Amino acid sequence: MMRTADLIDALGGALLREIVSGAGEQISDVALGEPDEVPFGQPDNLILGVGTGDPDAAVVLLRWAADASAGAVVLKAPLAANPRVREAAEELRIGVIELQPQASWTHLVWLVRSVLDRAIGVTVAGDASVYSDLFSFADAAAAIVGAPVTIEDAHSRVLAYSAVQDVSDPARISTIIGRRIPEEVVTYFQARGVFRRLRRSSEPIWVDEGPGGVLPRLIIPVRAGGELLGSIWAVTPKPVPPDQVHELEQAASVLALHLLRLRAQTGAARRMSAERLRAALIASTDDADTESWLRAGPWRVVALSASAAGDDLHRQIDLWESIVRRYGWSQPLLTEVDGVPLTVVTAEGAERTVGSWPWLRAIVEEVYAHDSTVFAVAGGCAQVSGALPQSRAEAIELSRLARAGQLLGPTVELEAVWYDLIVERARAAVRMEAGFLGGPIPDLLAHDRSRGTGYVATLATYLQHYGEPAQAARSLHIHPNTLRYRMSQMRAIADVDLTRPRVRLALQLQLIAVQGVQPDAPRLPPARRASRTPSPAGPSS
């Protein structure tokens, strides 16, 4: 079963558009609209109005569909939007979906069946070969023009590329290897209006030689129902003869069906997988069904980030899916919770074990060498599926520390930085908008602001090196006598017994809350110097 809206979204505006929303929101199967046949469909079926050509016949079909508790009825445009049809559908509370007039019923059946089968976990013969088909298509297109070819989706992400590599340039290599076109090349293509013409026209595009050794390109838009699905890019040093361009355009119409199928399968499957995974990361229950679709545990929930993808959550997830697929994870487990991209990997395995934490760490560290904005932080090990929400919460907390620059390296797991997490939780609990529940910190802060002293920084360093005044003085770049003088001055402002361990702990937590001081990594600036009463050693306080 899948929602009608998800099915429409999976196939896209190139094929389907909802006209009337019905009472039934779930689709379990697809059937042809032949009311004379017995039995006529099953509950929750998507009924295809093949051969229904006028409003009277459409109303009859809607009544039959409503009696059968169908999920929705598909009619071709403009019949689906006919006022009589809409009125009848609203009265019967049966959904009506419009099929674009140029679309084929045969192709629709094929695509809908593929999406539904994938959604309910049925392996359809040939599904696994969709990507390999695209690579074969790229090879065929390369043979037509005698040049290397890449196939990209509507967002300029590489889906496949030809084996022919005898002619290439830095832009093509970067696009294939790193899934990213160099910025100067993107600027050049934008200046030539390439992306604008791709969005607006179906005509082939020729781009002349560009900066940085960029070779000329022939670009063929791939469309269905007016919607841009992708494009074919051929790197060729000389213009392609018209007959070859025409042949490539004809091939693009076939490629459109492959891209529709790929989008339908991967889009619907990814959404359902993401929703299922998200539910498992939120609900704290041991569920045998959850463990049936997860690989054998134990697991870790990993928070992911890459600033190169910006703040757009969907782009972040798309980027990570592209990365892990490129390294062999054909069905990655990706979702988001609280705006943080997450994945679930097995906790154990070797660097070659696809979908494991060691494997992901190796990938992220390799990508980090080229993109220092990426990181992956893993929550604790979940022995049972019911522990996944705890691992998720830990991963999200660690991601906040990573974004704040408080963790080192592109990959971190909870066991290595548990103390940072404990301190962060305490800091969040202690921090208040106004006041610190008493203690000397407010008075010392006020003194520092009014007189330019550095007592708060001095106290933080003193506590970090408690019992080692000489080391504390060295960290502050002052004489030990100066440190003793400052401490005596602080006691005059706010007397506090630093010999009590609980007092020192409370002060450190307050200092962390006010200025983010870490007990083992002081981040406060050195104390400011001001012309005050000199200390016995000479320097000012």
Image (cartoon, helix red, strand yellow):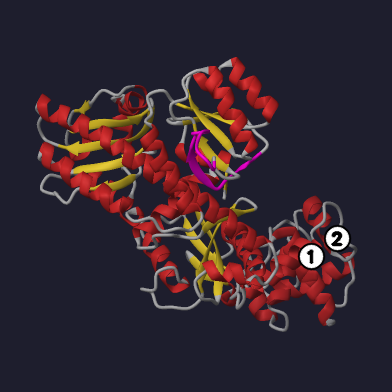
Residues marked 2 and 1 touching at CB (< 8 Å): yes
Give the position of the C terminus as an image quadrant. bottom right
Main SS of the magenta segment? loop
Residue at 41% from the left image edge and 23% from the top image edge: 101
Residue at 76% from the left image edge and 67% from the top image edge: 426
Which mark sits nearer the N-terminus, 2 or 1? 2
Residue 540 vertical position relative to residue 313 in the rendered view, above or below: below
Instruction: Please name the residue that numbered disc 2 is placed on.
Output: 436
Of 63 and 474, the residue lying toward us: 63
Left or right relative to 47: residue 265:
left
Left or right relative to 445: residue 116:
left
Give the structural element (helix, strand or loop) at label 1: helix
Give the structural element (helix, strand or loop) at label 2: loop
**Where residue 375 sits in the image (x, y, percent)?**
49, 60
Res 51 visible = yes
Q: Amino acid at mark 2?
A: Phe
Residue at 17% from the left image edge and 33% from the top image edge: 216
Cα–Cα span, label 2 and label 1: 7 Å
**Where residue 512 sits in the image (x, y, percent)?**
72, 64
**Magenta stretch?**
24-39
How many residues crowd mark 1 within 10 Å: few (<14), some (14–19), many (20+)? Answer: many
Left or right relative to 154: residue 284:
right
